[in-house]
């Protein structure tokens, strides 16, 4: 972890570099940038994942230890001859001490450093160009691919599964030049009906034949909440339903037993108590006062 003096110097160099790079950064990048947040990234995904859109295949990518594996040589070459470059090089090569043993850092950005997020964005800049993402004169995506990136976490929207597989190959080769690799286990190609997790949310399409023109509706929910709900549906109420639940029973019969259990849980939550855990009741806020 950088000491206070290094943190101050990193903040100074960051303030000098950031305006120039903000003018270059791609519109699909939302992480650790002034005036942007994770909510903006989720809003973009919401617009791209609408049921009436054509990009329904998702490359849910995961970079292995991105902040620890960025190539120093590529990063310094990309930054170019700017004031403070020698300081950046020293911070990258400073190493760290653990249990009184010095460890050299041959790659990666300083852990906990003020400038590290900016350096990561610089290293990952150009992903849109590599994937061939194009825009029209109104700033709307006009090509067959779309990208949303938050730091090292990103997803790519494609029209076909074959194109999604091609995108994964392009990304693997593109990241290799930066010293990075895609995780073979965590990088997935999924359809929007299967859903994917991004920034703690689960995004997917649900079938709604009577309430939408397309027959599908998009829903965003907390990833953990979605998993807990599914687990509760499959396992939770078995010991609370009279006679238990039989796999051989029709689905509508099982739902008839599950719904009362879910209703009790929602009632307890609204009254401030859930599964025996007491919490303070939620009060409505006072009406805003007019400012004279």
Image (spheres, rainbow, N blue to C red):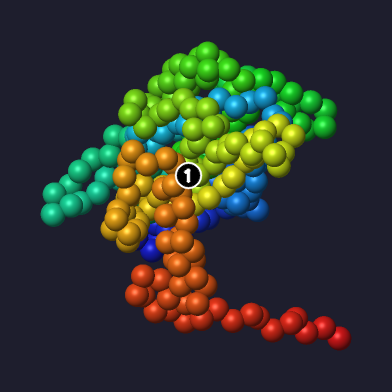
Give the quadrant of residue 126.
top right
Q: Residue furthest right?
A: 292
Give coordinates of residue 3: x percent, y percent. 34, 60
Give coordinates of residue 193: x percent, y percent. 54, 32
Count every numbered label the image shows and give the total: 1
Taking the image as drawn, is residue 192 in sight?
yes
In this view, the residue in front, 161 or 103, is 161
In this view, the residue in front, 60 or 9, is 60
| Residue designated by label 1 | 252
Task: Name the residue located 37 percent from the left edge and 32 percent from the top edge.
Answer: 186
Give coordinates of residue 179: x percent, y percent. 38, 27
Does residue 288 appear to the left or right of 44 in the view shown?
Answer: right
Task: Name the residue located 48 percent from the left edge and 27 percent from the top edge.
Answer: 190
Q: Residue 140, relative to residue 219: is it above or below? A: above
Looking at the rendered image, the quarter that the N terminus falls into is: bottom left
Q: How busy is the neighbourhood of tag 1: few (under 14 within 10 Å), some, or many (20 plus)?
A: few
Task: Name the residue located 46 percent from the left edge and 25 percent from the top edge.
Answer: 189
Q: Residue 245, relative to residue 190: is it above or below? A: below
Does residue 165 appear to the left or right of 15 in the view shown?
Answer: left
In this view, the residue in front, 207 or 42, is 207
Taking the image as drawn, is residue 74 in sight?
no
Q: Residue 141, relative to residue 237: is it above or below? A: above
Give the quadrant of residue 157.
top right
Does residue 49 appear to the left or right of 247 in the view shown?
Answer: right
């Amino acid at each position: 972890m950088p000491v206070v003096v290094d943190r101050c110097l990193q903040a100074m160099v960051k303030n000098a570099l950031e305006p120039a790079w903000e003018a270059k950064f791609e519109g699909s990048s939302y992480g650790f940038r002034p005036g942007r947040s994770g909510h903006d990234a989720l809003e973009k995904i919401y617009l791209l994942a609408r049921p009436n859109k054509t990009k329904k295949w998702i490359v849910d990518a995961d970079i292995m230890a991105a902040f620890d594996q960025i190539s120093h040589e590529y990063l310094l070459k990309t930054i170019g001859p700017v004031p403070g470059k020698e300081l950046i090089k020293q911070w990258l090569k400073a190493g760290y001490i653990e249990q009184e043993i010095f460890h050299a850092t041959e790659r990666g950005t300083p852990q906990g450093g003020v400038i590290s997020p900016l350096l990561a964005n610089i290293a990952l800049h150009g992903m849109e160009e590599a994937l061939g993402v194009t825009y029209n004169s109104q700033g709307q995506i006009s090509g067959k691919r779309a990208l949303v990136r938050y730091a090292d976490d990103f997803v790519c929207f494609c029209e076909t599964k074959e194109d999604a597989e091609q995108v994964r190959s392009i990304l693997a080769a593109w990241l290799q030049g930066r010293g990075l690799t895609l995780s073979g286990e965590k990088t997935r190609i999924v359809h929007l009906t299967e859903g994917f997790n991004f920034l703690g949310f689960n995004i997917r399409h649900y079938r709604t034949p009577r309430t939408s023109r397309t027959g599908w509706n998009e829903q965003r929910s907390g990833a953990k909440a979605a998993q807990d709900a599914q687990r509760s549906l499959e396992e939770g109420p078995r010991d609370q339903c009279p006679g238990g639940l039989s796999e051989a029973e029709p689905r509508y019969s099982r739902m008839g037993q599950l719904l009362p259990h879910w209703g009790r849980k929602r009632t307890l939550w609204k009254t401030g108590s859930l599964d025996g855990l007491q919490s303070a009741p939620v009060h409505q806020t006072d009406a805003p006062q007019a400012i004279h």
